[in-house]
Amino acid sequence: MPASTSNRPPCFFYGSLMEPKVLNAVTRPGPDAKHFAVRATVKGYTRYTYHNQPFPGMIASQNPEEIVEGLLVFGHSDLELHRLDQFEGPEYPRTTLQITVHDRVPAQFTMDMTHDYETETTLDAYAYVFTGPLEHLDLTRPWDYEAFKREHLSNWMTIDDTFKSMMERTGN
C-alpha cells in the first residue's frame, strides 16, 4: 500500500456512503487503490433523515449509550479525502471520533502497519458529523440504510439534483 494512505485515520460512513456505488462515485479511486472496509459503530450519536432527502445527518445523542452502525473504510488517499470533504459540504465537516470495529483489520491497513486491529478494538477515525441547523433534519425519522438502498439508491444517483450538485462539487 502506498505510504501516503497508511498514516491517516480511516473514515467512518453511516449513511449513503456505506453503499460502495456511492462511495466510489464520490472518491473515484485509482486502479492502485487498496481499501479495506469493516463493520463499525460509534457510541453516543444518532442519525436522522435530512428533510426531503434520502441521506442522513449524524448528531450527538442525548443518550450516551446510543449506537450508530456504519462502515469503517481504510486506505483513502489525500485526493479521495478531498473529494469526500467537497461532497459532504459545510454542514458535514470532517472530525475525529472514537469508532469500534466489529471485524478484524489486517495490519497492512492499520495506522502502525504492524499489528492487526482485533474485533471490538476502538480507534480514532474520521467521520462527517452533521453541524447544520437541526431543523434541516427530520428528528421524527431515524435514517434506515436498507430503506435507502431499496427505495432511493438508483434514482438518487442518476436523476436527483442534490446528488448531481454534490458530485459537481467534487469535479465528477
Image (cartoon, grey):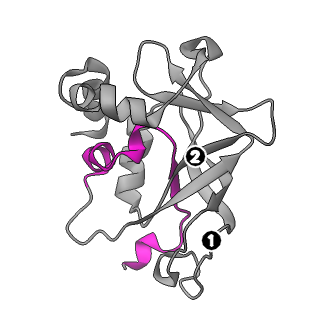
Q: Looking at the picture, how far across and down is residue 135, in whole percent? A: 61, 11
* Residue type pointed to by label 1: Thr
Quarter where residue 99 is shown: bottom right
Q: What crowding class fits label 1: few (fewer than 14 Cα within 10 Å), some (14-19), or many (20 or more)? A: some
- Relative to 116, residue 50 above or below: above
Report helix, strand or loop for mark 2.
strand
Q: What crowding class fits label 2: few (fewer than 14 Cα within 10 Å), some (14-19), or many (20 or more)? A: many
Position of the N terminus, as image quadrant, is: bottom left
Q: Which residues are magenta?
A: 2-28
Q: Residue at 74% x, 32% y: name it.
A: 61
Report helix, strand or loop for mark 1.
loop
Q: Is residue 9 magenta?
A: yes
Q: Read off the residue under disc 1.
A: 119
Q: Residue at 67% x, 67% y: name it.
A: 120
Q: Read off the residue under disc 2.
A: 69
Q: Looking at the picture, how far across and down is residue 138, in whole percent? A: 57, 14
Labels 2 & 1 near each other (Cβ < 8 A): no
* Total numbered badges shown on the rendered structure: 2
Using the numbered discs, state the Cα–Cα distance from disc 2 to disc 1 in whole angstroms: 15 Å
Q: Residue at 67% x, 64% y: name it.
A: 123
Q: Is residue 18 magenta?
A: yes
Horizontal arrangement in the rendering, residue 7 relative to residue 133 (left or right):
left
Horizontal arrangement in the rendering, residue 108 relative to residue 117 (left or right):
left
Residue 166 seen in render: no
Q: Looking at the picture, how far across and down is residue 70, in whole percent? A: 53, 48
Q: Residue at 62% x, 76% y: name it.
A: 118
Position of the C terminus, as image quadrant, is: top left
